[in-house]
Image (cartoon, coloured by chain):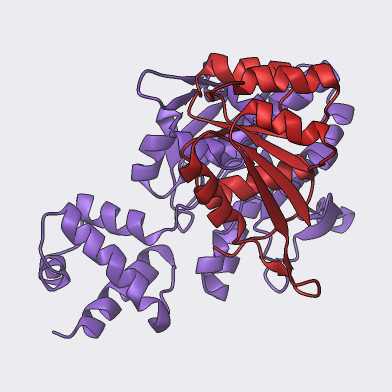
Amino acid sequence: MSHDKILTFFAHFIEKELGIIYAEHNYFQLKNRLEEIAKLKGIETIERLYEEAQKGIQGAFKQLLLDIATNNETSFFRDPKVFKAIEALILAEYQKKSPFGARLNIWSAAASTGQESVSTAILIKEFASKMGVNINFGITATDISERVLTRARKGSYSQLEVQRGLPAPLLIKYFKKDENDTWQVVPEIKNCIQFRTQNLKESLSFPEPFDLILCRNVLIYQNVEGKKEILNRITKTLAPGAFLIMGSGESLLGLSNDYESVSSEGAVIYRKKMPSLDKKAA
Amino acid sequence: MLNVLVIDDTKSVHAFVRNMLQKAPQVTNQHSPSVIMTSVYNGQEALDLLNSGKSFDLIFLDWEMPILDGPSTFAEFNKQGIKIPTIMMTTKNTFEDISKMLGMGVSEYLMKPFTIDILFEKINSVTGQDVPYVA
């Protein structure tokens, strides 16, 4: 069987399961990733991996394939203007509206190895300390990949990882170096974050509506229908008037009418519209 | 254009940093690089250069050096009122080391080894500039 046919087979499988599309010009990337899976499974070639797949892609094989198909690139405070906007707009508003300490509920929807959720928790702690207040908050951090979440739960980062996006004063305030020369997130931050697996293409169930959802660079891999479907599902988990943050290159244009866009600190943030009076009456 | 002083006793570190800084694109109209790097090999050489009237936008400072080490050099900067933003660049990177130097007033801390994206990120965060680089 030719390489192209094998790659097309796996590309179709990934698209069906995740909605992530591998265009043919990106097949080289898929090939590299399949070779990585083959190596992890102790299989010599992707032809053999394909033969294995014919018996059914299930269990650990399926998880591995879906893990590696997703892009786990991340850093602390990635796209800093987004975090400035969260502080200037969302935290400032929360503080005005909720002086009695209502819980701020946040979802990091593509948590990867946890840097986004850790950065958000640090941002809130720093804001609270600056304002001299307590902020009651919780972050739910989800990813489709159990492999990356296992790392995220440990809250353990290499020397290179902690130097990406994290200013040194925050490093020594919120991390401790262990005997293996890795940096551990302090319990004060770790305890604010709950990690769990979640495929955004499957049904979502959370105990409380969110005040902020970070869903950055997730939908770029979806086709238009996939984007609409996921957005629709995410929107239902967001409280009216609450915020959605997408990647800097992403837009809701033509995908959803449920939001209005707000600019802050050079970042565009989407705010879920309040239900109209007409709808309420109906 | 950014004028950078690197204070480190290891020649290969200068070559490594110079090589990375050359990835910043040339300033097209002036045919000059957007980052200019000057090398000295201990703290005393740095102080002599600064006291001769040379000025820099940013300093990279190693910890362990002969004649005058990093912390003593930075203490001299403080004493002499030299206010150039300084980034430590060292393998001395325990929690206590970093706390000590931040406490003394250094702007950032680069733990060796590091990669080009980290170098430029620290430069940009300390100088408030947006120096790009070609990866």
**Res A188 seen here:** no
- Where in the figure is residue A99, as x and y percent of width and height? 85, 21
Residues A103 and A162: in front is A162
Q: Give the answer, above or below, for where B134 lies relative to B67.
A: below
Would residue B21 appear left or right of A65 to someone viewing this image?
A: right
**Res A75 seen here:** yes
Residues B105 and A68: in front is B105
- Where in the figure is residue A43, as x and y percent of width and height? 10, 60
Quadrant for residue A92, please give it.
top right
**Residue pictured at 36% horizontal, 61% vertical:** A69
Q: Give the answer, above or below, for where B90 lies relative to A1.
A: above
Residues A279 and A272: in front is A272
Would residue A116 appear left or right of A130 to someone viewing this image?
A: left
Chain letter of the purple region: A
Would residue B56 appear left or right of B68 to someone viewing this image?
A: right
Number of disc labels = 0
Report the quarter where the C terminus of chain A lies.
bottom right
Please tell me the colour of chain B. Answer: red
- Where in the figure is residue B94, as x and y percent of width and height? 50, 19
**Residue pictured at 55% horizontal, 38% vertical:** A163
**Residue pictured at 45% horizontal, 41% vertical:** A113
